[in-house]
Amino acid sequence: MEEVAAVRRAAVAAVDDIEPGQLRDRITSRLDDAAFAPGVLTLASADAARDRTAEPGDGLTDRAAGVQLIYEGLSLTRTLAHDDPWEHGDRDAGDLDILIADILVSRGFYLLARTEAADDAVQVVRSFGSDQTVLRSTGDEGLDANLETDVLELAAVAGVTAAGVTPTAGLREYAATLADGGFPENAALLGEEVRATVAARVGVDPPATDGTEAAADH
C-alpha cells in the first residue's frame, strides 16, 4: 500500500543517521514488521481535513512518521516491561532494545516537536508511563490497550492540524474508538467511512501558532 510505504520511508529516514550501522539495521528491521495504522491514520485524517480546507498539508509524511515512531518506541517499552529480559532472558538484548525504544520515541518527538500535535505527543508518553505504573501495582492488564487508543487520537490530531484544522472533542473521541479490539486494517482507515467521519468531526478554524514553521514541515 502506497501510504504504508510512504510512512515507512519517512520513519527510516528519521533514523538514517543512527550509528553504529548494526544498531540502525536493528531499528529498520523493527520498522519492517510494524503495524502502520498510526501513520496511515495521520495521512487519512489530513486528507479528510483537506477536503474541508484545501490546505496542502506540508510535512505530512514527517508527521505520520513521528506518530509511528513514538508508537513503536512505546510498544517496545511495553513488551520489555512484560517480558523483563533483565530478570529472565537476554540482558544484553534487553539493554539494546531499551536503547532502541528511547531512540524511536525521541526521533518521533523531534518530528512533532514544533507542530500543533506536540502537546498531545507529550501527553501520550505521560499517560503511557502512568498506565504502566498502575499496571505494575494492580495487575490491570486492560491498561495496556490505552496505548493504541491514545496513539490513534494523536494520529488524528497530527493529521488534521497539518491541514490547518482544529481537532474537536468529537474527532478525538472518534479516533479513540478506532482502536477498539486493536488496530484496524490500513485499508479501513483509508476508506470512505473513516474519511467521511473525520471530515464531519473536524473544526473549521485554523489552530493557533506562534508564527514559526514546524520543524518537520519543509
Image (cartoon, helix red, strand yellow):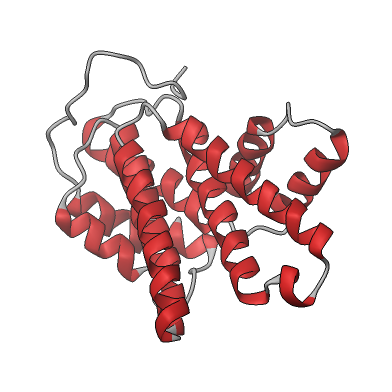
Q: Is residue 44 above or below residue 54?
A: below
Residue 128, given in percent of the width and then of the height, sits at: 42, 61
Left of 144 or right of it: where is 99?
A: right
Left of 193 or right of it: where is 218?
A: right
Residue shown at the point (61%, 39%) measured from the top left: 6
Residue 82, given in percent of the width and then of the height, sits at: 61, 75
Residue 63, given in percent of the width and then of the height, sits at: 46, 36
Residue 169, given in percent of the width and then of the height, sits at: 16, 55
* Image quadrant in which you'd find residue 77: bottom right
Q: Is residue 99 above or below residue 60?
A: below
* Image quadrant in which you'd find residue 117: top left
* Image quadrant in which you'd find residue 79: bottom right
Residue shown at the point (44%, 60%) measured from the top left: 189
The residue furthest left is 205
Residue shown at the point (38%, 45%) measured from the top left: 121
Residue shown at the point (51%, 48%) measured from the top left: 70
- The answer to whether residue 136 is seen in the rendering is yes
Q: Nearer the viewer, residue 165 or 128?
A: 128
The residue furthest bottom is 139
Left of 210 or right of it: where is 8?
A: right
The number of numbered discs placed on residues in the rendered structure image is 0
Q: Is residue 116 above or below residue 126?
A: above
Q: Is residue 58 above or below residue 62?
A: above
- The answer to whether residue 117 is seen in the rendering is no
Q: Nearer the viewer, residue 21 or 48?
A: 21
